[in-house]
Image (tube, grey):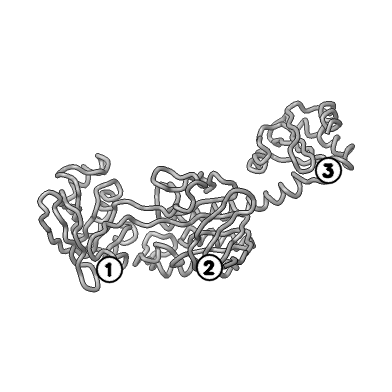
């Protein structure tokens, strides 16, 4: 089957809070934008009963309701949505390829917002109680729902113990299932000591989950002792799993830099190791995974994609033009030497306007544009011919410039 080809300015892979925010920013910038989501627009946030800590909603708001608002806002800005799975990507170069089963999408910039999924226990009946039926993965999101109730925590790492202590502000009891021997946990020592002193926290050692039980909602967790194989039935109102998180980055391996756990490595501008490719939200190697932080990531990447595309057009059409010899002056207006040499550059520009195209790049404001030339040093010169870099020079005088140009 021959696939259809479609062309966009920006393709966003993943429709959680971060991806939707990127879409809003890209759409508002009048970029032709496509968001691809394989299952449910809104991501994991849609499984949260109530989000009480998102700014602007003092009474709280349901995850589905909040994400629907994000979705509507993106559509109002002209963003296109496709509910399908991405099969492969080719992200290097100007023309970035995002391929689905039926269509090959071409983009100038790609934003990775694929998120991830919490690691499950694999215990019996687990799939029957996920998310809004009793098994949760975010204490910050769902703690208020369990006010004066009994909950269980599976896991003993930093996230498990710290989120468990947060739950004690709401729940009447927090039971922690720990796979290790009594007194041994994976969390940092400070968190361990605080948890052990917390009167609302109770620990069941040497245990793993055997099954989850209940009718419409979870009401019991059956634990199995790892040493005796005894089954321990624990009545609960809810259960939180903190045994790890699996980022959805399989299709990016070999192209995007990932850390040991598989998360995308990006800088504070959400930039990855490939120009024009950004990563946002839970798929990133980051400290806090919340809707509020996802929104921040998405906004930064949306602006970054707009800037990248605009700079690419300037770079290709003006800086690397092929009609004339190119003389590119890298300078900084806050540097006295750069300002003094500007007179020389402008003199050359006036005299050789017919044959030489002079461009000036402010490395302070446009470092990323200058970096495309392979240097951000200032003052310095880059010479081009037929759209290719042919020389670089830090020796800037009218005589040296004329000498270089005469040999091109």
- Residues packed near mark 1 inside 10 Å, few (<14), some (14 to 19) or many (20 plus): some
Query: As drawn, is 148 to the left or to the right of 316?
Result: left
From this view, report whether residue 1 is shown above or below residue 299.
Answer: below
Task: Name the residue beneath numbered marker 3.
Answer: 324
Q: Which mark is residue 188?
A: none
Q: Position of residue 20 (x, y in %)?
A: 50, 62
Do labels 2 and 1 touch, CB within 8 Å? no
Pick the quarter of the image with the N terminus.
Answer: bottom right
Q: How many numbered marks have been drawn onto this rendered protein structure?
A: 3
Ranked by sequence position, the earlier of labels 3 and 2 is 2
Tell me, yes or no, whether the two marked residues, 3 and 2, touch with CB atoms within 8 Å. Answer: no
What SS does tag 3 mark?
loop
Q: Residue at x 50, y 51 (%)?
A: 279
The image shows residue 68 at horizontal and vertical percentages of 46, 69
Disc 1 from disc 3: Cα separation: 68 Å
Measure the alpha-carbon separation of dots 3 and 2.
43 Å
Q: Secondary structure at mark 2?
A: strand
Q: Which residue is mark 1?
A: 128
User: Is 376 rendered above or below residue 161?
Assistant: above
The answer to which quarter of the image holds residue 339 is top right
Residue ID for mark 2: 82
Residue 244 position, x and y percent, is: 32, 51
Residue for point 77% across, 38% down: 384
């Amino acid at each position: 089957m021959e696939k259809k080809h479609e062309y966009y300015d920006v393709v966003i892979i993943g429709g959680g809070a971060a991806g939707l925010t990127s879409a809003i920013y890209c759409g508002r910038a009048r970029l032709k934008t496509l968001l691809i989501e394989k299952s449910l627009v809104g991501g994991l946030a849609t499984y949260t009963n109530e989000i009480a800590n998102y700014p602007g909603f003092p009474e709280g708001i349901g995850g589905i309701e909040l994400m629907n608002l994000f979705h509507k806002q993106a559509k109002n800005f002209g963003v296109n949505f496709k509910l399908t799975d991405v099969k492969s990507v080719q992200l290097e170069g100007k023309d970035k390829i995002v391929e689905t089963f039926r269509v090959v999408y071409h983009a100038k910039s790609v934003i990775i917002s694929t998120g991830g999924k919490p690691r499950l226990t694999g215990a019996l009946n687990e799939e029957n109680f996920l998310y809004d039926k009793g098994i949760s993965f975010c204490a910050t999101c769902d703690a208020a729902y369990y006010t004066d109730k009994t909950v269980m925590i599976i896991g003993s790492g930093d996230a498990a113990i710290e989120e468990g202590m947060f739950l004690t502000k709401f729940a009447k009891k927090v039971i922690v299932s720990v796979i290790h021997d009594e007194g041994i946990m994976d969390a940092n020592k400070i968190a361990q000591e605080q948890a052990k002193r917390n009167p609302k926290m109770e620990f069941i050692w040497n245990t793993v989950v055997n099954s989850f039980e209940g009718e419409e909602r979870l009401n019991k967790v059956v634990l199995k002792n790892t040493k005796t194989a005894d089954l321990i039935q624990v009545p609960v109102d809810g259960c939180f799993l903190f045994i790890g998180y699996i980022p959805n980055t399989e299709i990016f391996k070999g192209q995007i830099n990932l850390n040991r756990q598989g998360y995308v490595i990006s800088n504070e501008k959400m930039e990855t190791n490939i120009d024009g490719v950004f990563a946002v939200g839970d798929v990133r190697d980051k400290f806090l995974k919340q809707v509020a932080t996802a929104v921040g990531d998405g906004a930064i990447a949306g602006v970054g994609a707009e800037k990248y595309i605009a700079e690419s057009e300037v770079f290709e059409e003006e800086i690397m033009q092929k009609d004339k010899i190119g003389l590119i002056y890298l300078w900084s207006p806050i540097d006295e030497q750069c300002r003094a040499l500007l007179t020389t550059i402008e003199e050359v520009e006036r005299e050789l306007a017919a044959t030489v195209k002079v461009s000036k790049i402010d490395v302070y404001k446009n470092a990323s544009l200058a970096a495309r030339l392979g240097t951000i040093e200032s003052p310095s010169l880059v010479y081009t011919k037929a759209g290719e870099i042919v020389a670089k020079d830090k020796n800037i005088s009218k005589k040296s410039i004329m000498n270089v140009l005469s040999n091109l």
